[in-house]
Amino acid sequence: QLQLVESGGGSVQGGGSLRLSCVSSGYSPSKYCMAWFRQAPGKEREAVATIDSNGRTDYRDSVKGRFTISISQDNAKKTLYLQMSNLKPEDTAMYYCASDPPPGWVAVTNAHCTRNEADFGYWGQGTQVTVSS
């Protein structure tokens, strides 16, 4: 069983920075996709950034150059990060980390992590990010 626990959300003014963390414990495949999604009120959940076990990353256009996804591993525990800079009011949302389900390397299309939330089987509880203008 995989558990994901996010932290690091908060309220900031536009132009500010936040770093989100997501600790993954339990099941730890050698090949995987992990991602950050977000959902604003009244909108669908959308992928923000993905990272695979080879370190390859992918970002939605609106956050490129402002957000950085990274991951660190200590034995069976992985920590997923999202460094967010130059935050804008439109970045306000609940942010979720996600991991693909066993056996890992499932949320993949053409050897790259997908942005399709249906492909990710494990989700954290979410952390709120609010950016004021």
Image: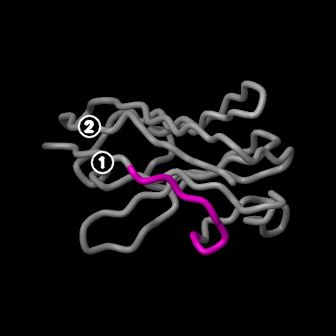
Report which quarter residue 23 is drawn in. Answer: top right
- The magenta-colored residue range is 117-126
Q: In the shown orientation, is residue 86 left or right of residue 120?
A: left
Check residue 10 in the rendering and tell me which mark sits there, or answer none: 2
Is residue 39 inside the magenta stretch? no
What SS does tag 1 mark? strand
Pointers 2 and 1 in contact (C-beta within 8 Å):
yes
Q: Is residue 112 above or below residue 86?
A: below
Q: In the shown orientation, is residue 104 left or right of residue 16?
A: right
| Quadrant where the image shows the C terminus | top left
Q: Position of residue 128 (x, y in %)?
A: 30, 48
Q: Which residue is mark 1?
A: 128
What SS does tag 2 mark? strand
Q: Position of residue 19 (x, y in %)?
A: 42, 31
Disc 1 marks a residue whose amino acid type is Gln
In space, the residues marked 2 and 1 are separated at their CA atoms by 6 Å
* Crowding near the residue tagged with mark 1, few <14, some 14–19, many ≥20 C-alpha atoms within 10 Å: some
Q: In the shown orientation, is residue 104 left or right of residue 80?
A: right
Residue pictured at 38% horizontal, 33% vertical: 8
Q: Between residues 98 and 112, which one lies in front from this camera angle? A: 98
Q: Please tell me how many numbered marks the rendered image carries.
A: 2
